[in-house]
Image: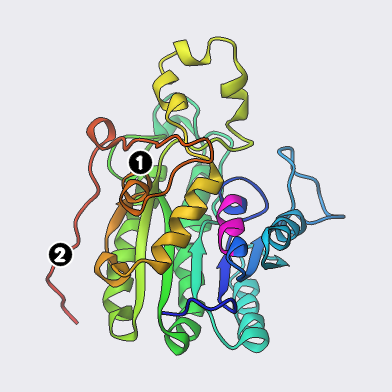
Amino acid sequence: MSNTPNRVAIVTGASRGVGKGIAIAPGASGATVYVTGRTTEGGEAHPLGGTVHGTAEAVTEAGGEGIAISCDHADDEQVRQLFERVGEEQQRLDILVNNATSVPRELAKPGPFWEKSLDLLRILDVGQRSHYVASYFAAPLLVRTGGGLVVSTSSYGARCYMHGPAYGAGKAGIDKMAMDMAVDLRDHDVAAVSLWLGFVRTERNEPLFQHPDAMKGPYGKFLANAESPEFIGRVIEALHRDPKRMERSGHVLIVAELAEELGIREADGRQPKSSRSVLGAPPEPSSVVIR
């Protein structure tokens, strides 16, 4: 595994939120980090703010080299061009973080799935499917480099009912893809994992924290145990350097549990706790391989 300053990472869906926090961590270790997203300076503003250029600047300020790439992960050709460019410019890839997703407006709307629009299926297209496509184009570079890591961000919603069947199917699919990609990548010293995030304090969720009675409500315990995007990034960075990296390959990991094992805490010293006992345990990969 490469621990040199010339490591190269790609973080998809990194204009803001989880992706931005994840991108900064390898930057702080001197890596070159390509960050992708649809929100660019001079383009259509996003209501939550943030751009890929802003994230790239944050990576550079942290000590690495941030490179912003405008990429719509619903467009396979744009994704192909992204990895072609990285291959031409860097000739290597050490870390791929699949984080791009679509958040349909009706995602958290109460009610059964048939009373919502089919727009919810976008989370399967930009999420589950786009994770596969990015990994497909990344694999030759990762195999050539060796010592790599593919992380796909997922959720307890893969196991418990969370936002309905479209969301659950998307997250469960991401988990299974990581298990199966690990089989194909194992002989090339490249690990693949799916990472269950806890409740994350992002720009989208910040209004919940600002409500005067936030901690008294039904979600108060989740808010009190929230993870920061930067915390998740440092866990992924530590996972890439972990001597047990290949032993963990093919598994669905809970970020809070992995953080505790690897000695990662929030900047304020807090240790977020796993929600395994409340929301469920990750699935285990099968040892059976049929080719």
Position of 120 relative to 175 (above/below): above
Q: Magenta part mainly helix, strand or loop?
A: helix
**Which residue lies at the image location 34% right of the left edge and 65% below the top edge?**
177
Direction from residue 2 to residue 183 in the image, left or right: left
The percent coordinates of residue 37 (x first, y second) are 67, 58
Residues drawn in magenta: 21-26
Height in image: 250 above or below 155? Answer: below
Answer left or right for 86 relative to 122. Answer: right
Residue drawn at x 39%, y 29% as measured from the top left: 112
The quarter in which the C terminus is drawn is bottom left
- Which residue type carries mark 1? Gly
Is 25 colored magenta in this rendering?
yes
Residue lying furthest right: 42
Q: Residue at x 55, y 84 (%)?
A: 92
Circles 2 and 1 in contact, beta carbons < 8 Å: no
Q: Which residue is mark 2?
A: 286
The label number, if any, that marks residue 157 in the structure image = 1
Q: Residue furthest left?
A: 288
Decide whether residue 22 is among the magenta residues.
yes
